[in-house]
Amino acid sequence: MKNPSKPAFISSLLIFVFLFSCLPSTTAQEVEDEREFDYLEGSEKGPRHWGEIREEWAHCKNGGMQSPIDLSSRRVKIIPKLGQLKRSYKSCNATLHNRGHDISVQWVGDDAGSIQINGTDYFLKQSHWHSPSEHSINGRRYDLELHMVHETQDPSVKNIAVVGLFYKIGQPDAFISKLMKNLVSITDKKEERNMGVIDPAEIKMGGKKYYRYMGSLTIPPCTEGVIWTINKKIRTVSRKQVKLLREAVHDYAERNSRPIQPLNHREIQLYGPNP
């Protein structure tokens, strides 16, 4: 006798597989609408509650590979064979966005170039700033952190790689200086400005040493499986530039940095080129 529940089971299984296969492309992106979450201490929409606001943000609360983390020297493993970061950027049309919780520069399509990690090309999509820095080194957070967000081209599964840069107060940063006039014009407004052609290579990396670990997006939906590459060189930014980046947004928080997350036995690699 045939089992009448078998067709229903197979149908349910196919639906589950279909939905699961669609999941990365719908949840990998950072949330653009700042009204859904904030950084205010004690807020019901603050970092401690992100994972409770929406079901698809559950990783923010339950994930085991969350970012940011502390890059502690005692946990770092030096791996010379990681090799120098392969960057191939080119000039491309870009817009400056006030996303409410941060300021971002977004490049059109895949025309801004890419980085290569383990033979895979990740194309630059946008860059944005957090202050103070989200990641820390031996417990120290810096005045500013830039995230350059890259994605693979496969439309079904968007794999993400982020390059992070630290800044301390000092001489103004040349790249941010180019944005200052337009930053002022969109202060406290959820607007964008066409910046014309911008070369991402103008964002200077500095040193060749970098940290590498597996983590997540640092804002909802906190998607995991993100490859983080964080330059060890500490660059400089003026106090005025940091203040403008923070005041330009309209989230009314003093900072837009997520608290440090547990490492959970993850390996932190450090590429240190031979002298």
Image (cartoon, grey):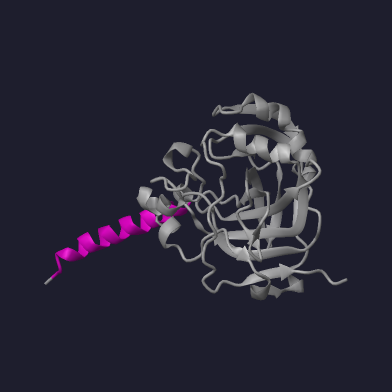
Quadrant housing the C terminus: bottom right
Among the 4 quarters of the image, the one containing residue 67: bottom right
Q: Where is residue 199? Give x, y as percent.
A: 77, 39
* Residue 108 in view in this figure: no
> What is the magenta range?
2-24
Where, by quadrant of the figure, is residue 180 drawn? top right
Residue at image point 72% right, 27% down: 181
Residue drawn where x is 76% and y is 67% of the image: 83
Relative to residue 64, is residue 46 depicted above or below? above
**Tally of marks:** 0
Spot the residue most to the top. 185
In which image quadrant can residue 201 be found?
top right
Seen as rendered, the residue at the extreme right is 275
**Foreground residue, 3 or 235?**
235
Task: Give the image location of residue 133, x and y in percent.
Answer: 64, 52
In the displayed structure image, the side of residue 2 where residue 133 appears, left or right: right
Front residue of 15/188: it is 188
- Residue 194 magenta-highlighted: no
Q: Is residue 8 magenta?
A: yes
- In percent of the image, x 36 and y 52: which residue is there? 52
Helix, strand or loop: magenta stretch: helix
Query: Residue 246's x, y, as percent?
Result: 61, 38
Q: Position of residue 50 (x, y in %)?
A: 42, 50
Q: Residue furthest left?
A: 1
Residue 80 in view in this figure: yes
In the visual, does 231 lie left or right of 250?
right
Q: For the N terminus, give its image quadrant.
A: bottom left
Q: What residue is drawn where x is 55% and y is 27%? A: 189
Query: In the image shown, does 138 or 54 lie closer to the viewer?
Result: 138
